[in-house]
Image (cartoon, grey):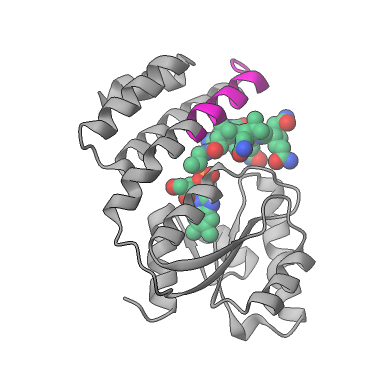
Amino acid sequence: MSNELVDAMANMREQEALNVAEKMLNDGEDPLKVLALCREAIEIVGKQFEVGKYFLPELVLAGEMLKRISKMAEPFLEQDSEVRTERLGKVVIGTVEGDIHNIGKDIVTFLLDVNGFEVHDLGVDVPPQRFVEAIKEVQPEVVGMSALLTLAFESLKSTVEAIKEAGLRDHVKIMIGGGAVDEEVREYSGADAYGEDAMAAVNLSKEWVGAK
Ligand code: B12
Protein backbone atom coordinates (compact mmCIF):
# COMPACT_ATOMS: atom_id res chain seq x y z
CA MET A 1 0.00 0.00 0.00
CA SER A 2 2.86 2.38 0.83
CA ASN A 3 4.27 2.01 -2.66
CA GLU A 4 0.83 2.39 -4.19
CA LEU A 5 0.39 5.76 -2.51
CA VAL A 6 3.82 7.05 -3.57
CA ASP A 7 3.33 5.75 -7.09
CA ALA A 8 -0.17 7.18 -7.53
CA MET A 9 0.84 10.62 -6.21
CA ALA A 10 4.10 10.83 -8.11
CA ASN A 11 2.28 9.88 -11.31
CA MET A 12 -0.59 12.33 -10.82
CA ARG A 13 -3.32 9.73 -10.33
CA GLU A 14 -5.19 11.93 -7.91
CA GLN A 15 -8.30 9.88 -7.17
CA GLU A 16 -6.29 6.72 -6.64
CA ALA A 17 -3.88 8.52 -4.29
CA LEU A 18 -6.80 9.87 -2.24
CA ASN A 19 -8.46 6.44 -2.08
CA VAL A 20 -5.29 4.66 -1.01
CA ALA A 21 -4.51 7.30 1.64
CA GLU A 22 -8.07 7.10 2.98
CA LYS A 23 -7.90 3.32 3.18
CA MET A 24 -4.53 3.39 4.96
CA LEU A 25 -5.84 5.85 7.55
CA ASN A 26 -9.06 3.91 8.09
CA ASP A 27 -7.07 0.70 8.46
CA GLY A 28 -5.15 2.27 11.35
CA GLU A 29 -1.89 3.25 9.66
CA ASP A 30 0.07 5.94 11.54
CA PRO A 31 -1.07 9.28 10.00
CA LEU A 32 2.49 10.60 10.26
CA LYS A 33 3.67 7.66 8.17
CA VAL A 34 1.01 8.46 5.54
CA LEU A 35 2.23 12.07 5.42
CA ALA A 36 5.85 10.89 5.19
CA LEU A 37 4.92 8.78 2.13
CA CYS A 38 3.28 11.84 0.59
CA ARG A 39 6.50 13.72 1.10
CA GLU A 40 8.40 10.93 -0.59
CA ALA A 41 6.08 11.26 -3.59
CA ILE A 42 6.41 15.03 -3.54
CA GLU A 43 10.20 14.70 -3.65
CA ILE A 44 9.82 12.72 -6.86
CA VAL A 45 7.48 15.37 -8.28
CA GLY A 46 9.99 18.09 -7.34
CA LYS A 47 12.80 16.24 -9.10
CA GLN A 48 10.68 15.74 -12.24
CA PHE A 49 9.98 19.48 -12.19
CA GLU A 50 13.70 20.24 -11.86
CA VAL A 51 14.60 18.13 -14.88
CA GLY A 52 11.79 19.61 -16.97
CA LYS A 53 9.57 16.52 -17.11
CA TYR A 54 6.86 18.10 -15.00
CA PHE A 55 5.70 21.70 -15.11
CA LEU A 56 3.74 24.06 -12.86
CA PRO A 57 0.37 22.25 -13.30
CA GLU A 58 1.93 19.08 -11.85
CA LEU A 59 3.36 21.03 -8.90
CA VAL A 60 -0.09 22.52 -8.32
CA LEU A 61 -1.79 19.12 -8.52
CA ALA A 62 0.79 17.54 -6.19
CA GLY A 63 0.15 20.38 -3.75
CA GLU A 64 -3.61 19.83 -4.00
CA MET A 65 -3.31 16.09 -3.35
CA LEU A 66 -1.09 16.73 -0.37
CA LYS A 67 -3.44 19.35 1.04
CA ARG A 68 -6.40 17.01 0.75
CA ILE A 69 -4.56 14.09 2.32
CA SER A 70 -3.30 16.33 5.18
CA LYS A 71 -6.92 17.38 5.83
CA MET A 72 -7.94 13.72 5.78
CA ALA A 73 -5.15 12.89 8.27
CA GLU A 74 -6.05 15.68 10.71
CA PRO A 75 -8.71 13.80 12.74
CA PHE A 76 -6.35 10.84 13.04
CA LEU A 77 -3.49 13.05 14.20
CA GLU A 78 -5.85 14.59 16.73
CA GLN A 79 -6.79 11.16 18.07
CA ASP A 80 -3.12 10.29 18.48
CA SER A 81 -2.36 13.42 20.51
CA GLU A 82 -3.69 14.14 23.91
CA VAL A 83 -5.71 17.25 23.13
CA ARG A 84 -5.20 19.63 26.00
CA THR A 85 -7.29 22.49 27.20
CA GLU A 86 -4.51 24.23 29.09
CA ARG A 87 -1.83 25.57 26.78
CA LEU A 88 1.87 24.74 27.05
CA GLY A 89 3.05 27.97 25.45
CA LYS A 90 2.74 30.25 22.45
CA VAL A 91 4.24 29.93 18.99
CA VAL A 92 4.30 32.54 16.23
CA ILE A 93 4.80 30.91 12.85
CA GLY A 94 4.91 31.91 9.19
CA THR A 95 6.47 31.28 5.80
CA VAL A 96 9.13 33.93 5.27
CA GLU A 97 9.11 36.79 2.78
CA GLY A 98 9.23 35.84 -0.88
CA ASP A 99 7.96 32.31 -0.33
CA ILE A 100 4.33 31.22 -0.66
CA HIS A 101 4.63 27.49 0.11
CA ASN A 102 2.35 26.72 3.03
CA ILE A 103 1.47 23.03 3.09
CA GLY A 104 4.32 21.99 5.41
CA LYS A 105 3.83 25.03 7.62
CA ASP A 106 0.14 24.22 7.95
CA ILE A 107 0.94 20.66 9.03
CA VAL A 108 3.39 22.02 11.62
CA THR A 109 0.76 24.51 12.83
CA PHE A 110 -1.88 21.82 13.15
CA LEU A 111 0.40 19.45 15.04
CA LEU A 112 1.59 22.19 17.42
CA ASP A 113 -2.02 23.11 18.08
CA VAL A 114 -3.20 19.59 18.88
CA ASN A 115 -0.14 19.09 21.06
CA GLY A 116 -1.10 21.96 23.32
CA PHE A 117 0.40 25.14 21.86
CA GLU A 118 -1.39 28.40 21.14
CA VAL A 119 -0.29 29.01 17.56
CA HIS A 120 -0.42 32.36 15.80
CA ASP A 121 -0.05 31.69 12.09
CA LEU A 122 1.01 34.77 10.13
CA GLY A 123 0.51 33.06 6.76
CA VAL A 124 2.90 33.18 3.82
CA ASP A 125 5.29 35.74 2.34
CA VAL A 126 5.65 37.29 5.79
CA PRO A 127 8.01 40.30 5.96
CA PRO A 128 10.54 40.40 8.83
CA GLN A 129 8.80 43.39 10.39
CA ARG A 130 5.53 41.46 10.62
CA PHE A 131 7.29 38.77 12.67
CA VAL A 132 8.68 41.51 14.93
CA GLU A 133 5.22 43.06 15.45
CA ALA A 134 3.68 39.67 16.19
CA ILE A 135 6.36 38.86 18.76
CA LYS A 136 5.61 42.16 20.51
CA GLU A 137 1.86 41.52 20.43
CA VAL A 138 1.74 37.82 21.26
CA GLN A 139 4.90 37.41 23.37
CA PRO A 140 5.53 33.83 22.28
CA GLU A 141 8.24 31.59 23.68
CA VAL A 142 8.85 30.14 20.21
CA VAL A 143 9.03 31.53 16.68
CA GLY A 144 8.79 29.16 13.72
CA MET A 145 9.78 30.05 10.18
CA SER A 146 9.19 27.96 7.12
CA ALA A 147 11.12 28.32 3.84
CA LEU A 148 11.05 26.09 0.76
CA LEU A 149 12.84 28.26 -1.77
CA THR A 150 16.60 28.59 -1.54
CA LEU A 151 16.03 32.28 -2.28
CA ALA A 152 14.07 32.50 0.96
CA PHE A 153 17.11 31.49 3.06
CA GLU A 154 18.08 35.16 2.84
CA SER A 155 14.70 36.06 4.35
CA LEU A 156 15.29 33.63 7.22
CA LYS A 157 18.50 35.47 8.00
CA SER A 158 17.00 38.95 7.67
CA THR A 159 14.06 37.97 9.87
CA VAL A 160 16.37 36.71 12.62
CA GLU A 161 18.34 39.95 12.27
CA ALA A 162 15.19 42.09 12.47
CA ILE A 163 14.20 40.26 15.67
CA LYS A 164 17.68 40.94 17.05
CA GLU A 165 17.56 44.61 16.07
CA ALA A 166 14.19 44.99 17.80
CA GLY A 167 15.85 43.76 21.03
CA LEU A 168 13.66 40.64 21.12
CA ARG A 169 16.19 37.92 20.31
CA ASP A 170 16.70 36.90 23.96
CA HIS A 171 12.95 36.57 24.51
CA VAL A 172 12.31 33.88 21.90
CA LYS A 173 13.70 30.61 20.62
CA ILE A 174 13.67 30.42 16.84
CA MET A 175 13.17 27.22 14.84
CA ILE A 176 13.26 26.93 11.09
CA GLY A 177 12.24 24.22 8.65
CA GLY A 178 10.86 23.34 5.24
CA GLY A 179 12.22 21.59 2.16
CA ALA A 180 15.97 22.01 1.87
CA VAL A 181 16.53 23.72 5.23
CA ASP A 182 19.31 21.99 7.15
CA GLU A 183 21.92 22.61 9.83
CA GLU A 184 24.00 24.72 7.45
CA VAL A 185 21.04 27.00 6.74
CA ARG A 186 20.35 27.15 10.47
CA GLU A 187 23.86 28.37 11.09
CA TYR A 188 23.66 30.90 8.25
CA SER A 189 20.32 32.28 9.43
CA GLY A 190 21.22 32.52 13.12
CA ALA A 191 18.17 30.51 14.23
CA ASP A 192 18.41 28.26 17.30
CA ALA A 193 17.42 25.00 15.67
CA TYR A 194 16.08 23.43 12.55
CA GLY A 195 13.42 20.75 12.49
CA GLU A 196 13.18 18.12 9.83
CA ASP A 197 9.46 17.51 10.16
CA ALA A 198 6.36 18.59 12.02
CA MET A 199 7.03 16.30 14.97
CA ALA A 200 10.48 17.89 15.35
CA ALA A 201 8.74 21.27 15.61
CA VAL A 202 6.56 19.92 18.42
CA ASN A 203 9.52 18.34 20.24
CA LEU A 204 11.67 21.48 20.00
CA SER A 205 8.83 23.68 21.24
CA LYS A 206 8.11 21.35 24.15
CA GLU A 207 11.77 21.30 25.10
CA TRP A 208 11.96 25.11 24.98
CA VAL A 209 8.91 25.67 27.18
CA GLY A 210 10.17 23.02 29.62
CA ALA A 211 7.37 20.56 28.87
CA LYS A 212 9.55 17.55 28.07
C1 B12 B 1 3.60 21.93 -3.94
C2 B12 B 1 4.71 22.82 -4.44
C3 B12 B 1 4.36 24.09 -4.91
C4 B12 B 1 2.94 24.64 -4.82
C5 B12 B 1 2.76 25.20 -3.38
C6 B12 B 1 1.34 25.05 -2.88
C7 B12 B 1 1.24 25.51 -1.45
N1 B12 B 1 0.07 25.99 -1.11
O1 B12 B 1 2.18 25.44 -0.66
C8 B12 B 1 2.99 25.75 -5.92
C9 B12 B 1 2.58 25.15 -7.24
C10 B12 B 1 2.14 27.00 -5.65
C11 B12 B 1 4.50 26.05 -5.96
C12 B12 B 1 5.02 27.24 -6.43
C13 B12 B 1 6.38 27.43 -6.65
N2 B12 B 1 7.36 26.54 -6.45
CO1 B12 B 1 7.11 24.90 -5.49
N3 B12 B 1 7.04 23.17 -4.90
C14 B12 B 1 6.08 22.39 -4.43
C15 B12 B 1 6.61 20.99 -4.02
C16 B12 B 1 6.25 20.00 -5.14
C17 B12 B 1 6.10 20.46 -2.71
C18 B12 B 1 6.27 21.39 -1.49
C19 B12 B 1 5.50 20.78 -0.33
O2 B12 B 1 4.36 21.14 -0.05
N4 B12 B 1 6.11 19.75 0.29
C20 B12 B 1 5.45 18.92 1.31
C21 B12 B 1 5.55 19.49 2.70
C22 B12 B 1 4.77 18.65 3.71
O3 B12 B 1 6.91 19.44 3.01
P1 B12 B 1 7.67 20.67 3.67
O4 B12 B 1 7.11 21.96 3.24
O5 B12 B 1 9.11 20.42 3.50
O6 B12 B 1 7.25 20.56 5.21
C23 B12 B 1 7.65 19.53 6.11
C24 B12 B 1 9.01 19.77 6.77
O7 B12 B 1 9.96 20.41 5.94
C25 B12 B 1 8.70 20.49 8.04
N5 B12 B 1 8.57 21.95 8.06
C26 B12 B 1 8.00 22.80 7.16
N6 B12 B 1 8.00 24.04 7.64
C27 B12 B 1 8.56 24.02 8.86
C28 B12 B 1 8.80 25.02 9.80
C29 B12 B 1 9.42 24.70 11.00
C30 B12 B 1 9.65 25.78 11.98
C31 B12 B 1 9.82 23.36 11.27
C32 B12 B 1 10.53 23.05 12.51
C33 B12 B 1 9.58 22.35 10.33
C34 B12 B 1 8.94 22.68 9.15
O8 B12 B 1 7.47 19.92 8.43
C35 B12 B 1 6.66 19.62 7.28
C36 B12 B 1 5.88 18.37 7.55
O9 B12 B 1 6.71 17.30 7.86
C37 B12 B 1 8.14 21.28 -3.93
C38 B12 B 1 9.05 20.06 -4.14
C39 B12 B 1 9.74 19.60 -2.87
N7 B12 B 1 10.64 18.67 -3.03
O10 B12 B 1 9.52 20.10 -1.79
C40 B12 B 1 8.33 22.40 -4.94
C41 B12 B 1 9.49 23.44 -4.79
C42 B12 B 1 9.67 23.82 -3.34
N8 B12 B 1 9.00 24.59 -5.55
C43 B12 B 1 9.93 25.13 -6.23
C44 B12 B 1 9.74 26.28 -7.06
C45 B12 B 1 10.94 26.71 -7.89
C46 B12 B 1 8.52 26.96 -7.08
C47 B12 B 1 8.20 28.25 -7.89
C48 B12 B 1 9.29 29.34 -7.87
C49 B12 B 1 7.82 27.80 -9.31
C50 B12 B 1 7.56 28.92 -10.30
N9 B12 B 1 8.39 28.93 -11.32
O11 B12 B 1 6.66 29.70 -10.11
C51 B12 B 1 6.90 28.73 -7.16
C52 B12 B 1 7.26 29.59 -5.92
C53 B12 B 1 6.48 30.81 -5.73
C54 B12 B 1 6.92 31.48 -4.41
N10 B12 B 1 7.22 32.74 -4.46
O12 B12 B 1 6.97 30.85 -3.36
C55 B12 B 1 11.28 24.45 -6.05
C56 B12 B 1 12.24 25.26 -5.16
C57 B12 B 1 13.64 25.19 -5.70
C58 B12 B 1 14.59 26.04 -4.94
N11 B12 B 1 15.78 25.50 -4.79
O13 B12 B 1 14.34 27.12 -4.49
C59 B12 B 1 10.86 23.03 -5.49
C60 B12 B 1 11.89 22.39 -4.54
C61 B12 B 1 10.63 22.13 -6.72
C62 B12 B 1 11.93 21.81 -7.44
N12 B12 B 1 12.53 20.68 -7.14
O14 B12 B 1 12.39 22.56 -8.26
N13 B12 B 1 5.21 25.02 -5.49
Q: Which residue occupies the foreground of this view, 37 or 19?
A: 19
Relative image position of residue 51 (x, y in whole percent) = 60, 21
Q: Identify the residue shown where x is 69% and y is 64%.
A: 157
Q: Identify the residue shown where x is 34% and y is 23%.
A: 5
Q: Is residue 207 left or right of residue 108?
A: left
Relative image position of residue 162 (x, y in whole percent) = 76, 73
Kindly give the residue lying farthest to the left in the view shown: 27
Q: Is residue 199 left or right of residue 164?
A: left
Q: Identify the residue shown where x is 59% and y is 20%.
A: 58
Confirm whether residue 181 shows in the render: no
Image quarter where the C terminus lies is bottom left
The relative height of residue 195 versus residue 142 in the rendered view (above or below) is: above
Relative image position of residue 183 (x, y in whole percent) = 50, 60
Tell me which segment is drawn in magenta: 51-67
Q: Is residue 58 left or right of residue 34?
A: right
Quadrant position of residue 101: top right
Quadrant of the image where one finds ligand 1: top right
Magenta includes 138?
no
**Magenta-drawn stretch, dominant element (helix, strand or loop):** helix
Q: Which residue occupies the foreground of this view, 187 or 84?
A: 84
Magenta includes 56?
yes
Q: Identify the residue shown where x is 46% and y is 68%.
A: 117
Relative image position of residue 165 (x, y in whole percent) = 77, 80
Image quarter where the N terminus lies is top left
Confirm whether residue 77 shows in the render: yes
Q: Which residue occupies the foreground of this view, 164 or 190?
A: 164
The relative height of residue 9 versus residue 166 in the rendered view (above or below) is: above
